[in-house]
Image (cartoon, rainbow, N blue to C red):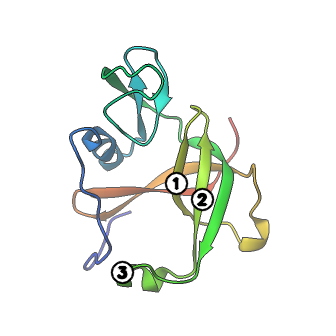
């Protein structure tokens, strides 16, 4: 989906360690870090493996499938840019790769939310050079 008009929300500031993640989203891919030392998958992007402390990293494409671990329904804007989106649901998801991610959940009525609900990642280009992930109902792997 392409963005139209002015984007007035907060935007991420990629670091050297997170830039491949954001570049992957711009290509419609969810990329996760994989430790070059022990092979552990990690997310959010960071310079050092929390398990073996290796600084070696490679990037692998995730399946984009997972299940809801928890959620919150936001009714109050933390920033003026999200006022028109209220209310919206933020979900913490257990991805198949064994890590968690947080993203907006769309297409699930409040009364259908449940822990373990299968979801998948989709992508929305919100402005030139910025694509964000969001979650929709999906089938388990």
Residue sitting at 24 percent across and 50 percent down? Answer: 14
99 is higher (above) or lower (below) than 92: above
Mark 3, secondary structure of its residue: helix
- Residue 77, percent across and down? 47, 82
Residue sitting at 38 percent across and 46 percent down? Answer: 28
Whichever of callouts 2 and 1 sits on the residue coming sooner in the sequence is: 2
Relative side of 19 to 114, left or right: left
Asked if labels 3 and 2 touch by Cβ distance under 8 angstroms, the answer is no
Quadrant (top left, top right, bottom left, bottom right) of the N terminus = bottom left
6 is higher (above) or lower (below) than 36: below
- Residue labelled with disc 3: 81
Whichever of callouts 2 and 3 sits on the residue coming sooner in the sequence is: 3
Mark 1, secondary structure of its residue: strand
Residue sitting at 53 percent across and 82 percent down? Answer: 86
- Residue labelled with disc 2: 91
Disc tally is: 3
- Residue 123, percent across and down? 43, 54
68 is higher (above) or lower (below) than 88: above
Crowd class of label 1 (few under 14; some 14 to 19; many from 20; radius 10 Å): some
Mark 2, secondary structure of its residue: strand
Compute the Cα span from label 2 to label 3: 19 Å
Compute the Cα span from label 1 to label 3: 19 Å
Relative side of 121 to 49, left or right: right
- Residue labelled with disc 1: 102
Asked if labels 1 and 2 touch by Cβ distance under 8 angstroms, the answer is yes
């Amino acid at each position: 989906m392409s963005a139209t008009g002015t984007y007035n929300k907060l935007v991420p500031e990629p670091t050297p360690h997170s830039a491949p993640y954001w570049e992957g989203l711009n290509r419609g891919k969810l990329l996760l870090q994989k430790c070059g030392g022990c092979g552990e998958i990690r997310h959010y992007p960071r310079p050092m493996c929390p398990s073996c402390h290796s600084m070696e990293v490679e990037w692998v494409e995730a399946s984009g499938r997972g299940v809801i671990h928890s959620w919150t329904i936001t009714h109050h804007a933390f920033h003026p840019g999200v006022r028109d989106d209220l209310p919206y649901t933020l979900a913490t998801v257990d991805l198949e790769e064994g890590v968690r991610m947080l993203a907006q959940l769309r297409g699930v009525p409040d009364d259908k939310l449940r822990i373990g609900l299968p979801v998948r990642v989709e992508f929305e280009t919100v402005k030139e050079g910025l694509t964000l992930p969001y979650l929709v109902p999906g089938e388990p792997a």
